[in-house]
Image (cartoon, helix red, strand yellow):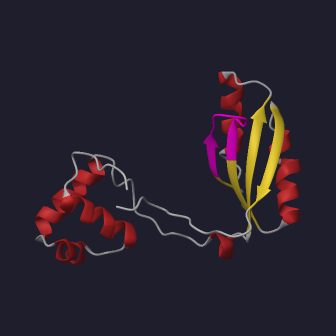
Amino acid sequence: MFAVPHDLDKIDLKILRELSADGRLSWRDLAERIGLSLTPTLRRVHRLEEQGYIRGYFAHLDERKLIGGLTVFISVTLENQSEAAIQRFEKEIVVAPEVMSCFTMTGDADFILRVVVPDLDSYQSFLSKTLTRIPGVEHIRSSFALKTILNRTSPML
């Protein structure tokens, strides 16, 4: 487990747990589940939103059904790590629909991408038409996910 921020109490954590499990929960049902009346529940939810603990409400879409079943983790190294080179890469990668996540890294790679595509042909197309055409990309290493064991969308509270 991890240390809970000092400005959250047990009721706040209950709210976050309930909403992370079901973002479509009605305010009345939420109030009932956490043991408060509607007005204090809404006040707390609004405070959690304002403080940035709740960043939004969304549907968790099934990537496999919508896009396909090939998940690839790609390590990308740039020719140089100048601010301009990094910004150029980031600008290009955020518009690629195949890229589901992108992280700057320490260590051997400058970036790790999580790419989801329907099949190997689509991955080859992404490599040749998108990734290798970004100026400054020096090295690409791909690892294919065999099976998803865990894919949390929020921390365990």
Residue 67 drawn above or below residue 143: below
Residue 23 is one of the magenta-drawn residues: no
Residue 106 is one of the magenta-drawn residues: yes
The one of 146 and 72 positioned closer to us in this rendering = 146
Residue 75 drawn above or below residue 117: above
Q: Residue furthest front?
A: 1
Find the magenta span and give its range: 101-112
Residue 125 drawn above or below residue 41: above
Quarter of the image with the C terminus is: bottom left
70 sits to left or right of 55? right
Quarter of the image with the N terminus is: bottom left
Give the percent coordinates (x, y) of residue 101.
62, 51
12 sits to left or right of 62? left
Q: Residue at x 85, y 42 (%)?
A: 132
Residue 117 placement: quadrant: bottom right
The one of 97 and 109 positioned closer to us in this rendering = 109
Q: Is residue 97 visible?
A: no
46 sits to left or right of 65? left
Give the percent coordinates (x, y) of residue 12.
22, 59
Residue 123 placement: quadrant: bottom right
Q: Residue at x 70, y 31 (%)?
A: 88
Give the percent coordinates (x, y) of residue 111.
68, 40
Give the percent coordinates (x, y) of residue 50.
27, 48
